[in-house]
Image (spheres, grey):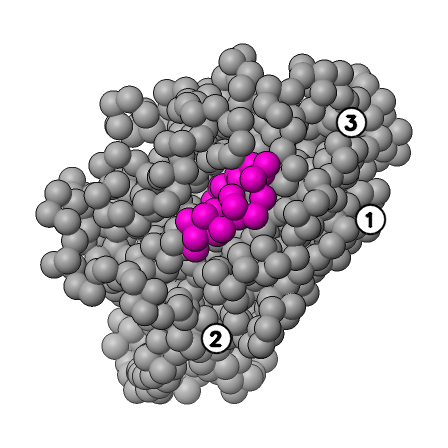
Amino acid sequence: MQSNTKWGKFIKELSNLFFFWFFGVLFFTVFRVIFIAVFQEKMSHAAGFNEIAKVLFAGFKFDCTAVAYFIIIPFLLLLVLSPFNLFNAIKTTRKVLQYLFVILSTIICVVSINYFKEYNNQFNNFMFLALYDDQKAVLKTVVEDFNPILNLISLIVIIAVGILIFKAFENKNFINSKLSKIHFKGSQFVIILVTLLLFVIGIRGSASTVPAIRKWAGVSKDEFLNKTVVNPFRSLKYAIKDFNDLNLLDGNNPFMPNGDFENLFTQEKITDVLLKKAKGATIEKPKQIFLVIMESYDSWPLMEKYLPFNLSSNLNSLAKKGTNFTNFIPASNSTFNSFGSITTNVPYCGVNIGTLGAINEPFKTSIFNQFKKLGYEINFYYGGFLSWQKIGEFTTYNGVERSFSGVDVEGGLASGSWGVEDEVLFNMVLKNTDTTKYSLNVILTTSYHPPYTVDVYSKGFPYKTIDDFPKEVSKYYDNGMTLDALGHLWYSDKAIGDFVTKAENRYPESVFCFTGDHYGRRFINHQPSLYEKSSVPFVVYGKSVQKQVNTTPGSHIDIMPTLIEMIAPEGFEYYSFGTSLFDEKIKYGIGFCKILTSNELLYFPKDKQIETFDLISKKKNYIDETSLKEHADKLMALSWHYIMKGDHIKEKIESQQ
């Protein structure tokens, strides 16, 4: 019989590889459908079947490439070893790859759903932050916030079913019988050639000259659906590549060719480019400055339409009595990276500066070192462990003189917690900030963070059910975030309100500054605008601070120069990537992959169209290019060089060429 010949065995094994490919592509298609169903609230109302069909077809191309990488070894072995009748080795290899596919694909798909739940995206640079996080705190968050039992059961069931399907179809002859009937002169050569051609098309994800790559993944008008196109394996590959492009010390500047960089910046040092002179103080020099960086604190609760929720009534009150910068974005979408930009004044450019250690001198742009020159003692207060992201070493190296953490409060900090409750942290600030000394006190809160462990109802949170929401705003809520999460946002605001009330009496000559580290990744509904899911507050309140609304566009790197220009004497020299928000010449604020102007917010995702949001009409649009991107790249190139290569420009570049 033909099935016992080499060719018969070849066709049988080839049939199993075809089934392997079919199962793999179907597996990822089903995953994509489930993914869309799980997060269907994130789809725009205009997205219909046609849009879903587009992303399923585009996703099919990426799935083909992922499956092809699992098939490539058994396929090549079939071509090479079949003439020697080594079909047992070929079969064993193929089975191992099938089981590996089921196990690894199931794991990455389940992880991808949970990752998207937190970060509203498939794998990206956030995944590398966990390497430097408090691992016990991460584990506690996973256990309490991400249904580990349900995920484990899902993993076991899907893996078991997948393996059983492969076993059940191992000896089926449907595909084999069809291929075996192909007989004509040269048929064996044609079958091998066609199979090779199909494999090449599969591994490229395309039969045209354009392969399946991230650049062409934005096939839908719906932002969420576009995020489902790239296969999880490819998404992971892109995340690793993007991280390496930005974080390799011996790499080239990813934002500008070295030659262009040297031609643009003719100075000897980066700090020569950044040197500024203060125009003269506009308020009486405050004795204490409290710069509060609030975990996950967005600006949307301060927007007029959401004010009736009363989630940020304390900060809103301070904003009305002080200077409220209403056109403001963060440096990044993560806590440490934004904290690093605020305190060092170096824009976040994709590099986690806390992990680099002392490869270069302390940043001359640091708010700590520059406020020392103004006569301030530098204190840092953090609700968590100073070992988190090496934040203790990082702040000390860049100029902090006294550091306090959750372990310094009475009772200490439980291992596995992100930090003490905010009111406990603020009490520690009041206890340790000297009333007689001039001091800059940088405070980083932690309570508004999963797994949300504060008993907010015992603190007075008023909403026990959604029926308790004020009527005028209940229409905005569709379970986009839990009541517990809303309660922790409310609690964070309550804590800062109580703190200011106490601190004003204790430090009558003080100034308070409040900003959020990043958008909280949660919103009251599933359709936040680009601005609602990007912006954070910046409020300055205290003695001599003018009562006003400032609409100058800005970002975290503009905080330090704004404060310096408020209090420093005329002629005081300082270094800053940003500019004072009282400078009317400012035309835009820059964050990582985002630019904010007086009337528009632009988002620059890699290899995709630029998303724009009009702040006046509240409409979004997509464009291919804008000259504003050049301004962002210029700043990011300068930042990357300063972080990775140090202060010198020419000699460092010449040594790379």
CA separation in Å, label 3 and label 1:
17 Å
Task: From this view, report whether residue 556 is shown above or below residue 48.
Answer: above
Q: Secondary structure at mark 2?
A: helix
Question: What's drawn in magenta, residue-wise?
Answer: 495-517
Give the residue at mark 1. Answer: 359
**Amino acid type, label 3:** Thr
Camera-nearest residue between 239 and 430: 430
Counting other residues with Cα less than 10 Å from the Cα at mark 2, is it few (<14), some (14-19), or many (20 or more)?
Answer: some
Q: Which mark is residue 271?
A: 3
Q: Is residue 106 in the magenta section? A: no
Front-most of 70 and 113? Answer: 113
Q: Amino acid at mark 2?
A: Lys
Q: Examine the image and state in which quarter residue 566 appears.
A: top right
Which SS class for mark 3? helix
Q: Nearer the viewer, mark 3 or mark 1?
A: 3
**Depicted 492 relative to depicted 424: above or below:** above
Q: Position of residue 213 (x, y in %)?
A: 46, 44
Which kind of residue does numbered mark 1 sit on? Answer: Ile
CB-based contact (under 8 Å), mark 2 and mark 1: no
Which residue is found at the position 55% from the left and 16% from the top?
583
Residues at marks 2 and 1, CA–CA distance in whole angstroms: 33 Å
Residue furthest top in the image: 585
Residue drawn where x is 48% and y is 75% of the image: 140
The numbered mark, 2 or 1, whose residue comes first in the sequence reads: 2
Identify the element where label 1 is drawn.
loop
Q: Earlier in the sequence, mark 3 or mark 1?
A: 3
| Camera-side residue of 342 and 310 | 310
Give the alpha-carbon distance from disc 2 to disc 3, as whole Å: 42 Å
Per the rendering, the mark at residue 140 is 2
Left or right of 68? Residue 619 is left
The answer to whether residue 97 is seen in the rendering is yes
